[in-house]
Amino acid sequence: MNPYAKLTFLMSLMLGTAITISSNHWMSAWAGLEINTLAIIPLISKSHHPRAIEAAIKYFLVQAAASTLLLFASMINAWNTGQWDITQLNHPTSSML
C-alpha cells in the first residue's frame, strides 16, 4: 500500500474517532463512526489474501447493521422527545436498541 494512502487512512481513522468521542448529537456520532468504517476497511483488506477480504466484508456487514440500529434508535428518540442530543436518551425503546 502506498505510504501516503496508508497515512490518509490512519488520519481519517483518528478524525472519525475524535468526531465520535466529542459529539453531542446523534448524527455527528454516526458520521464519525461511518468515517471510521470507510477508513478501516481498506486497512483490513490491504493484503489481498482471501481471508482479509472476507474479514473486511464481515466487518462491513456487521457495521452496517449496527449503524442502522443506531440511526433507528436515535430517530425513535427524536420522534418521541424532540431531542437529538446523546444525553437525552429517555425513550425505553431507543434505550433498548
Image (spheres, grey):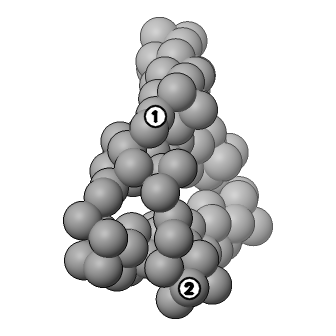
Which quadrant is the N terminus positioned in? Answer: top right
Residue bearing the label numbered 1: 23
Pick the front one: 83 or 19: 83
Compared across the picture, whether 30 is left or right of 78 comes to right
Q: In this view, which residue lies farthest toward the right?
A: 51
Q: Are marks 2 and 1 in contact (CB under 8 Å)?
A: no
Pick the front one: 94 or 80: 80
Task: Tell me which amino acid carries mark 1.
Answer: Ser
Q: Position of residue 64 (x, y in %)?
A: 46, 72
Q: In this view, which residue lies farthest toward the bottom?
A: 93
Q: Position of residue 85 (x, y in %)?
A: 39, 49
* Dot 1: element: loop
Quadrant housing residue 97? bottom right
Residue 44 visible in image = yes
Residue bearing the label numbered 2: 92
Pick the front one: 64 or 9: 64
| CA distance for labels 2 and 1 | 22 Å
**Residue pictured at 56% horizontal, 85% vertical:** 92
Residue 37 visible in image = no
**With respect to residue 45, does 28 lie above or below?**
above
Foreground: disc 2 or disc 1: 2
Task: Tell me which amino acid carries mark 2.
Answer: Pro
* Dot 2: element: helix
Pick the front one: 11 or 15: 15
